Amino acid sequence: MLRNCAKPLSNRVCLLLVALLPGFVLAQQAPVEPADDAYARSIVEKADQVRFPAEGFQVDIVISTSQAERTSEQRKYRVLSKGNENTVVMVTEPAAERGQIILMKGRDLWVFMPEVSQPVRISLAQRLTGQVANGDLARANFAGDYNPKVLRNEVVDGENYVVLELAAVDRSVTYQKVIYWVNQKNAWPFRAEFYSLSNRLLKKASYEDFRTLAGKVRPTRLVMEDALRSGEKSVLEYSEMKLRDLPDRVFTKEYLKKL
């Protein structure tokens, strides 16, 4: 190619071709991966829809927490949610805490307690019980809370997974960074790692026991393990999920005060 270009083309054009040739060859050899932002966001959105319906719904959650050399603890909640931005979390057990309610509007949270006249503002990252933060129950909108990018592809037990890095849109969300494994074929969430603002690994999670809930196959068991203290974990089990037409007034302070 260099011999042929020497006569009909000027030296300047030949030099340009020589400079571009290595890059052209590499571009032809490198595999093309759909790793742009739109592709990453579409994966996270699909995984969100697998975990929970986009419509209004109700679900019961049992959280069992175990710690080294301590008796395991179990708590029960009923969650009402609508459109990823409105959630009510009600404590149903233990009986001593029945009546406590968490209200989420966007990324704003309040807790209502029977013995306190005014709601108390709380954060998504604040611990609810065991390894579970308020945001783990009240807000599960990864697509809205994080900017995703594809890190790599992995094969686990013969299944292809897309591994994404989710960067928090601001400091108000539950975790500042999430490494997220999603099945490439069906968008089922597989596992996640949750990081602090200082990039310290806080928790590891796995999505398990996929069954049909509210008309779609979803994970019915979420295991969250403390990455800093071995043997400490919380298991969330989801059941009795059903779609509900929830009016907007349910997700207001005035309505919850009546409860």
Image (tube, rainbow, N blue to C red):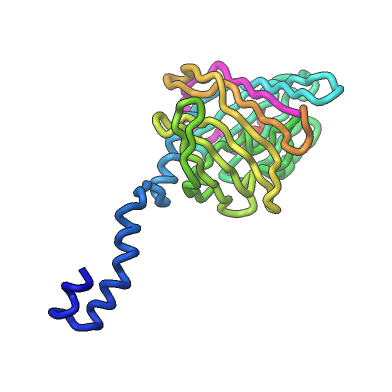
121 shown above or below 89: below
Residue at image x 86%, y 22%? 69
Spot occupied by residue 114 in the image (x, y as percentages of width and height) = 76, 30
Q: Residue at x 59, y 22 (%)?
A: 221
- Whether 58 is drawn above or below 166: the answer is above
Examine the rendered structure and indicate whether residue 219 appears above or below residue 169.
above
Instruction: Decide which of 52, 194 is in the foreground and name it.
Output: 194
Residue 30 falls left or right of residue 127: left
Which image quadrant is residue 89 in? top right
Magenta residue span: 232-252
- Tell whether position 130 is magenta: no
Q: Residue furthest right?
A: 69
Figure quadrant of residue 112? top right
In the picture, the quarter occupied by the N terminus is bottom left
Question: For residue 201, which quarter of the picture?
Answer: top right
Q: Can residue 49 be seen by looking at this rendering?
A: no
Image location (x, y in percent) of residue 217? 45, 21
Q: Is residue 178 left or right of residue 64?
A: left
Residue at the spot x=39%, y=49% of the render? Answer: 38
Quadrant the C terminus occupies: top right
Toward the left, the furthest residue is 8
Is residue 245 magenta-colored? yes
Q: Residue at x 25, y 82 (%)?
A: 12
The percent coordinates of residue 134 (x first, y second) are 67, 37
Residue 117 percent coordinates (x, y): 77, 37
Q: Nearer the viewer, residue 77 or 208?
A: 208
